[in-house]
Image (spheres, rainbow, N blue to C red):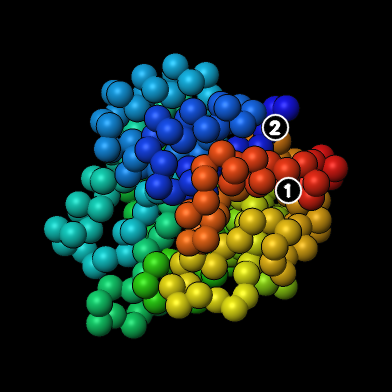
Amino acid sequence: MTHGRFSLNQATIKYASLAEALQVAVDTGYETIGLWREPVAEVGLDKAVELVQQSGLRVSSLCRGGFFTTLPGPERDAALEDNRRALEEAHRLGTDTLVLVAGGLPVGDRDLIGARERVRDAIGALAEDARSLGVRLAIEPLHPMYAADRAVINTLGQALDIAEQFAPEVAAVVVDTYHVWWDPQVLEQIARAGKDRIASYQICDWITPLPADNLLARGIPGDGHIDFEPITRAVLAAGYEGDIETEIFHADVWARPYAEVATEVADRYHRLIEPLL
């Protein structure tokens, strides 16, 4: 059985090497995969491109760029250069979507508004690189509990406020159910985004109680509190026709056999999401 537009984000089987992740995806019926930069770097970009081409899979997205909220200086310059490399990597791997995690507040800094402005400025600095490579800078709002240390962009509306300052082929947004399900304005903002501004749709569930490491609270769809139907219907109504990724961060999921996890999340997609398409 194949899974059509459903994409296995590599984070869901975090400890698999790139070669292992590609093989698991192929063996369990996927046609597309979302990649992370670290496993790509482990084998080198040239080898990674070769492995992807040999697998026959499409790459739905590359994660991640961003982390450019630092104050002007060498650290910020280095972050921008790293994002330029990430854009090139995405282009070489065959995806038009580089997922951005904005970055949190610099150490000792409390200027949240200023940090958000630096996100906008960074995207402006990268806009021509993105345009020339045909890769969109996909801003992913993260749940507010990550505002201090990981992402100062916390609602889809905030992400769109930045993205809309640039052409749609340069800047767009990621709709990740884990991060936006709580937002009373999420359906309105999805409609605002429309077809041209939604670069990626990701599904995973909100599990309670939250673990001590709150990064690891993302569950398999159907195991938590999120109602996927209204969000999915809104994304589809907005005209989104791209891949639908699953990106799970959970220690128990990561400890399981890769193929077992890949099969289970696909089963949940077919049960919860595919009937809505």
Residue 104, given in percent of the width and then of the height, sits at 37, 69
Residue at figure coordinates x 52%, y 42% from the top left: 258
Residue 200, given in percent of the width and then of the height, sits at 59, 44
Which of the two residues, 275 or 94, is positioned nearer the viewer here? 275
Query: Quick check: 56 above or below 67?
Result: above
Say whether residue 261 is visible. yes
N-terminal of the pair, mark 1 or mark 2, is 2
Query: Quick check: 196 above or below 190?
Result: above
Label 1 SS? helix
The residue indicated by pointer 1 is 268
Q: Quadrant of the C terminus?
A: top right
Q: Quadrant of the N terminus?
A: top right
Residue at figure coordinates x 43%, y 33% from the top left: 20
Residue 3 badge: 2
Taking the view exactly as shown, the residue that stands out farthest to the right is: 275
Query: Quick check: 148 above or below 221?
Result: below
- Determine crowd level at label 2: few under 14, some 14-19, many 20+ residues with C-alpha closer than 10 A: some
* 64 horizontally vs 246: left or right: left
Residue 14 badge: none
Three-letter amino acid code of the residue under disc 1: Arg
Label 2 SS? loop
* 142 horizontally vs 213: left or right: right
Residue at figure coordinates x 77%, y 63% from the top left: 227
Query: Quick check: 50 above or below 176?
Result: above
Residue at figure coordinates x 34%, y 40% from the top left: 39
Say whether residue 129 is visible. no
Residue 152, given in percent of the width and then of the height, sits at 44, 69
Q: In terms of image quadrants, where is residue 2? A: top right
Three-letter amino acid code of the residue under disc 2: His
For marks 1 and 2, give the CA distance. Answer: 11 Å
